[in-house]
Amino acid sequence: MKITQCTMEQLDETAAFYDKVVAYLDAHVNYPKWKRGEYPGRESTAQAISEGVQYICTEKGKIAGAFILNDVPLGDYSAARWSLDLKEGDYLVIHTLAADPQSYHRGIGRFMVEYCIKTAREDGYRALRVDTVPDNFPARRLYESMGFTYAGTEGLNRNIEGIPEFALYELNFIGGRHE
């Protein structure tokens, strides 16, 4: 498996990947409560690519996973009870992490999160944070198994219908570029 920044030439394939994931979730259990064609969708993927923060995980030339990694939280992260009081820019945030449903339980999610941890450490961030729908038990188990600490449940003032609160997780690093 290989992780690379997604390019505009890969927009169609990446948007189709997210659509495939959401279609699978809709047919089974849509833990993250994503909406096909809305989020994650072509528009959000194109924006992330243009900002240089959309990544894809490929295996044998096909997209096996995708995620966004940046230092911009969605919502009011300052309302949360994090163990470290950090400013935006002191931590990275994982968004829209998805693995190919045909490849579940093969370690793709773990591989992508390991990449995020390595990137955050190498780039000198003090923490890696993520928010997820509280009922997204697969994501919560993944983050917990990788050493992330539960930081509570907050609304984050995101005003998303059907998702009043988010479960927050953090992985703090000793040191960092802002100490």
Image: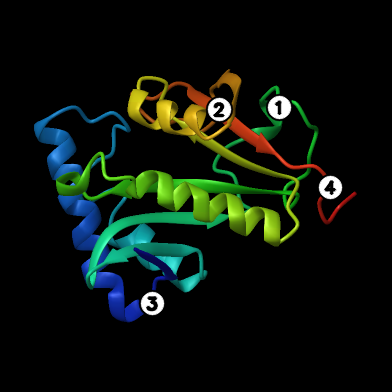
Q: Earlier in the sequence, mark 2 or mark 3?
A: 3
Q: Dot 3: few (<14), some (14–19), or many (≥20) neighbours within 10 Å?
A: some
Q: Give the alpha-carbon distance from disc 2 to disc 1, as whole Å.
A: 9 Å
Label 2 sits on a secondary structure element that is strand
Q: Give the alpha-carbon distance from disc 4 to disc 3, as whole Å.
A: 32 Å
In the rendered structure, the answer to whether residue 83 lies left or right of residue 102 reads right
Q: In the rendering, at what x and y percent does residue 100 appear?
A: 22, 50
Q: Is residue 94 above or below residue 10?
A: above
Q: Earlier in the sequence, mark 4 or mark 3?
A: 3
Label disc, if present, on residue 175 of the rendered structure: 4
Q: Mark 3 points at which residue?
A: 7
Q: Dot 2: few (<14), some (14–19), or many (≥20) neighbours within 10 Å?
A: many
Amino acid tagged 3: Thr
Q: In the rendering, at what x and y percent does residue 119 appear?
A: 61, 59
Q: Mark 2 points at which residue?
A: 168
- Which of these two is toward me, 137 or 81? 137
In the rendered structure, the answer to whether residue 3 lies left or right of residue 119 reads left
Of tags 2 and 4, the one toward the viewer is 4
Image quadrant assignment for residue 26: top left
Kindly indicate whether the residue at mark 1 contacts the one at mark 2 (C-beta within 8 angstroms). Answer: yes
